[in-house]
Amino acid sequence: MMIILLQIPKFLWAIQREHRQIERIVKNENIDLLISDNRYGCWSSAVPSVLITHQIYSLMSSSWKWIEGIINYGNHQQIKKFNECWVPDFPTGVTGKMTQPILPKTKFIGMSSRFQKQIIPIKRELLFLISGPEPQRSIFERKIKEEIKRIDCKSYFLVKGKPEIINEAYENEINHLPAVELNKAIESSQCVISRSGYTTIMDLCKLEKKAIFIPTPGQTEQEYLAEQLKANGTAFYQNQNEFDLAMALAESKKYKGFDGYPLSSNLLADAIDNLLKSNS
């Protein structure tokens, strides 16, 4: 965390540099509208600008709670530079206090995903998706393999989250899957065990899957989202150092999975239409 605090001046300088570049592009290319995916410098004083983020309120670990107010004051000052702030969630979704307080310019646009819902027969019980930085990625992989061996699990597939390594596929594991193949792998699995990153949550929501989450240790956002999903009856979670596959599978039967979210919502289309109408 101290390293992050020391990098704040560099972060703010990068935002200013990005903003200057955007202003030149808007002028030179006659841009009419900007939509920024979590890039705080991508706004213009000349045209309507929209920020997409699920982090209106940044969560700090317990030892850094004292600075949470300062960090979020700065975050809100950056958001205010945009005409609108779009949150990829539903008003009663899973982001909870991460999107509180709801600023006047905030609009929920529903969860978005690169994946498409398909009719694919279930071919395995479990799909393990490993992701994140080292050394936690390797620790998680080791824990998974220990648990698979301990309960003698046969019906599973493991995606190890190592796109930088030559993709050697084995019967039950692979280093990496491109989006189309990963879409199929998730659809053909009864339950997904993964980190509780927000992109993964949106993907599993889109595909209406059952899940078990193991947050990356020390990542406050993942821990909070896993707690939220457990509290609302969507998915069971365990801490990585307590991971017990047999127990997790038994407990997960008490949870509904992502089935039931309003996937046909027109929130995004409505936000786009309203934005275009108000600036036409």
Image (cartoon, rainbow, N blue to C red):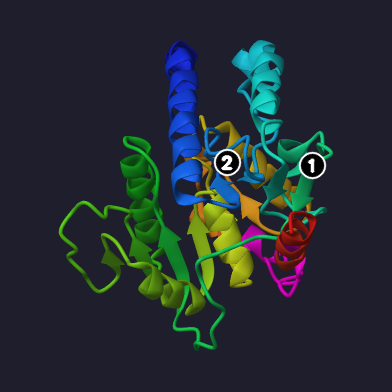
- Residue 261 drawn above or below residue 55: below
What distance separates the C-alpha of mark 2 from that of mark 1? 26 Å
Q: Secondary structure at mark 2?
A: helix
Residue 135 in the magenta stretch? The answer is: no
Residue 256 in the magenta stretch? The answer is: yes
Tell me the magenta residue range. 250-268
Q: Position of residue 211 (x, y in %)?
A: 58, 62
Q: Residue at x 61, y 62 (%)?
A: 112
Circle 2 is placed at which residue position?
222
Amino acid bearing label 1:
Lys
Q: Quadrant of the C terminus?
A: bottom right
Circle 1 is placed at which residue position?
105
Say if residue 203 shows up in the picture: yes
Say if residue 154 shows up in the picture: no
Apparent side of residue 280 relative to residue 188 in the rendered image (left or right): right
Q: Position of residue 243 (x, y in %)?
A: 50, 46
* Magenta: main secondary structure: loop
- Residue 157 drawn above or below residue 236: below
Q: Position of residue 171 (x, y in %)?
A: 25, 74
- The tag on residue 68 is none
Which of these two is toward me, 191 or 22? Answer: 22
Amino acid bearing label 2:
Gln
Front position among marks 2 and 1? 1
Q: Residue at x 59, y 56 (%)?
A: 201
Q: Quadrant of residue 160?
A: bottom left
Apparent side of residue 165 relative to residue 264 in the rendered image (left or right): left
Which of these two is toward me, 138 or 274? Answer: 274
- Label 2 crowd (10 A; few <14 / some 14-19 / many >=20): some
Q: Position of residue 244 (x, y in %)?
A: 51, 50
- Residue 112 drawn above or below residue 53: below
- Residue 29 drawn above or below residue 128: above
